[in-house]
């Protein structure tokens, strides 16, 4: 009986630890996976001028989940001294002491290795581009210590799947088109991550963490709106280069309307409303993707 009880206790501890690891990777909050995945899917469809090879699609979807998970782990490791002082983050596994910093580093390394293994079937150029992706994921959490626009660093990290997708699909990167798509995504990322930072602005000011919400100050909504406009216009330019049909225009129109809705939602800058506006960007990414997928279908 005691052996059975001991086994059950061990299993319960193991299950609790696995839940902590899953929470550390934010698998219970997949919004970040979607925000990283949407621009990668845009790029795959643009690069293939339609449905990409299913093998490539599978590699990029799995790689996105692994890289976003790794980014969350290293972020919580980097912020382990700050998170206990922020209401929204104080119960995260490392901040709450349920996962040790050493465990976090080991998990981060494992996720990066798995992501690189998943990428091995890709061609040489795509593989070389995966190395900066790992570096950007590892360095982003420390950017907020050194400059006031860490959201730009995140934008680059969340855009690196774009040239990788072109390289994997075409064997080369047409930087004119891929660069426009990256620029659109960087603008979009800075915009939605500023909304995220607006929700934490009071806590960030107390603990001395830098963010675009603090940098932009009372012009935050205006700058977010201009960035959203730039993202939509740059996406329109990419669609024009790719010869997308009218469904793409409809997708961009829906995305633009969602941006207007976000601006209205955050008009009073209430933290809960700002966070809700951040979450709503999943619909922006989905609208653009549906526009790309339908706009590149054979016409006639």
Image (tube, grey):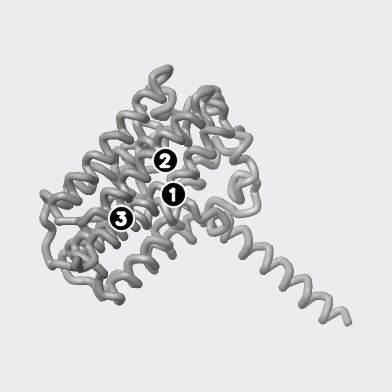
Residue 64 at what x, y percent from top left? 38, 61
Say if 117 sits above or below 194 in the image.
below
The answer to whether mark 2 and mark 3 are in CB contact below 8 A is no
Regarding residue 134, the answer to whether it shows in the image is no
The mark found on residue 235 in the picture is: none
Spatial CA distance of label 3 from label 1 is: 12 Å
How packed mark 2 is, by other alpha carbons closer than 10 Å (few <14, some 14-19, many 20 or more), is some
The mark found on residue 283 in the picture is: 1
Q: Residue at x 64, y 63 (%)?
A: 17
Residue 154 at what x, y percent from top left? 35, 43
Q: Quadrant of residue 131?
A: bottom left
Q: Which residue is mark 3?
A: 291
In the structure shown, which secondary structural element does the residue marked by tag 2 occupy?
helix
Say if 210 sits above or below 133 in the image.
above
In the structure shown, which secondary structural element does the residue marked by tag 1 occupy?
helix
Spatial CA distance of label 2 from label 1 is: 8 Å
Say if 95 sits above or below 274 in the image.
below
Residue 172 at what x, y percent from top left? 11, 63
Regarding residue 256, the answer to whether it shows in the image is yes
Q: Which residue is mark 2?
A: 258
């Amino acid at each position: 009986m005691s052996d059975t009880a001991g086994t059950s206790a061990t299993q319960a501890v193991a299950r609790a630890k696995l839940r902590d690891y899953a929470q550390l990777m934010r698998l219970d909050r997949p919004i970040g996976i979607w925000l990283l995945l949407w621009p990668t899917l845009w790029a795959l469809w643009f690069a293939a001028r339609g449905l990409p090879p299913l093998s490539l699609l599978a590699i990029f979807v799995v790689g996105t989940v692994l890289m976003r998970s790794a980014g969350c782990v290293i972020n919580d490791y980097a912020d382990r001294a700050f998170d206990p002082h922020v209401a929204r983050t104080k119960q995260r596994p490392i901040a709450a002491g349920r996962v040790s910093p050493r465990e976090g580093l080991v998990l981060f390394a494992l996720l990066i290795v798995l992501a690189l293994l998943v990428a091995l079937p890709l061609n040489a150029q795509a593989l070389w581009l995966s190395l900066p992706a790992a570096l950007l994921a590892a360095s982003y959490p420390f950017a907020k210590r050194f400059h006031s626009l860490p959201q730009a660093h995140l934008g680059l990290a969340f855009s690196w799947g774009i040239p990788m997708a072109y390289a994997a699909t075409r064997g080369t990167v047409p930087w004119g088109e891929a660069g426009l798509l990256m620029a659109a995504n960087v603008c979009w990322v800075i915009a939605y991550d500023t909304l995220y930072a607006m929700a934490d602005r009071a806590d960030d000011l107390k603990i001395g963490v830098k963010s675009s919400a603090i940098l932009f100050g009372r012009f935050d909504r205006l700058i977010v709106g201009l960035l959203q406009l730039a993202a939509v216009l740059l996406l329109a330019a990419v669609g024009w280069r790719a010869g997308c049909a009218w469904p793409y225009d409809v997708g961009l129109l829906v995305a633009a309307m969602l941006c207007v809705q976000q601006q209205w939602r955050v008009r009073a800058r209430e933290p809960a409303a700002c966070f809700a506006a951040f979450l709503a960007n999943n619909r922006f990414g989905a609208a653009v993707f549906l526009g790309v997928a339908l706009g590149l279908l054979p016409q006639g």
